[in-house]
Image (cartoon, grey):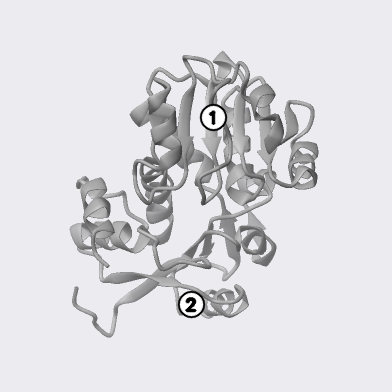
Amino acid sequence: MKITAATRLAGVVGRPIRQSLSPAIHNAWLGAAGIDAVYLAFEPDGLSELVSALRARLVLGLNVTAPFKAEALASADVASARAERAGAANLLTLDGDGAVLADNTDGEGLLAAFAEQAPGYTPQDGPAAIIGAGGAAAGAALALLEAGAPQVRILNRSPARAADLASYFGERVSAHDLGESDAALDGAVAIVNATAVDPAVSLAAAAPNAIVLDMAYRPVLTPFLRRARARGLATVDGLAMLIGQARPSFSALFGVEVPDIDVRAVAIAAMSVP
């Protein structure tokens, strides 16, 4: 990659962020598209300085991951409907008038991952269960509800946080403690781990036709997905979701369609680099 005086900058913000594959994915697309730009990872204590850099047009835009998604939404001047409804943003860009725009492509990425790796899944077929109650869980809940899921069940270590998220979305969303996993998974046709760790949730009550997605992607076949496969359940990996949410982010950041390259292979290769 050649850095010039005209090279533009974008990136991803999180804490921790060192293990992110977003730079590998976006820089591969930039190279294939011949765009003079670079995509980096940032690990600040907060978003204020980077949002100021965005307002000053020192960066083109920012993807945002945990724990800054709620702060990203609050930092914006204008928010998309899906970011507002999720209560979280994973993308900040600048419009022509200098206003900071917040969007949330997590739900789009989630549905793209299901479509790619479990094309038979139809949200309308039954309830979905989501483990976690943070910004990623909110984005997933919104996407599944809007795609027609009749019910979404939120499981979380903190019942109060699960209840807050359920209350935010209304009567089609219910809150459950992790100890109630059997009841929460009963009849669920989709089970989503929206945490960064292997959840302490048994899949014993999962229906035989349930599809399990883990947003974590290091390793691609996580322990949670291994347990799902051991029970004969179909699985969707977090790398597919990461790429799915990155596609609309790339177009928003750089103003072009995503190049047709095997970026999944690029990301997997990047995992082997210390």
Q: Is residue 2 above or below residue 249?
A: below
Q: Answer left or right for 86 relative to 171.
A: left
Give me the residue at 47% from left, 15% from top.
209
Relative depth, front residue between 78 and 26: 26
Q: Amino acid at mark 1?
A: Ile
Can you tell which quarter of the image residue 202 is in? top right
Can you tell which quarter of the image residue 77 is in? bottom right
Q: Answer left or right for 128 relative to 255.
A: right
Return the disc, 1 or 2, that comes first in the chain's sequence. Answer: 2
Residue 182, position in %: x, y? 64, 24
Residue 196, position in %: x, y? 51, 51
Which residue is disc 2 drawn over? Answer: 57
Q: Residues within 10 Å of mark 2 (few under 14, many from 20)?
A: some
Residue 91, position in %: x, y? 52, 58
Whether residue 266 is visible: yes
Q: Amino acid at mark 2?
A: Arg
Which residue is disc 1 drawn over? Answer: 191
Give me the residue at 70% from left, 34% from top.
179
- Quadrant of the image for the C terminus? bottom left
Whether residue 113 is visible: no
Q: Residues within 10 Å of mark 1 (few under 14, many from 20)?
A: many
Relative depth, front residue between 56 and 135: 135
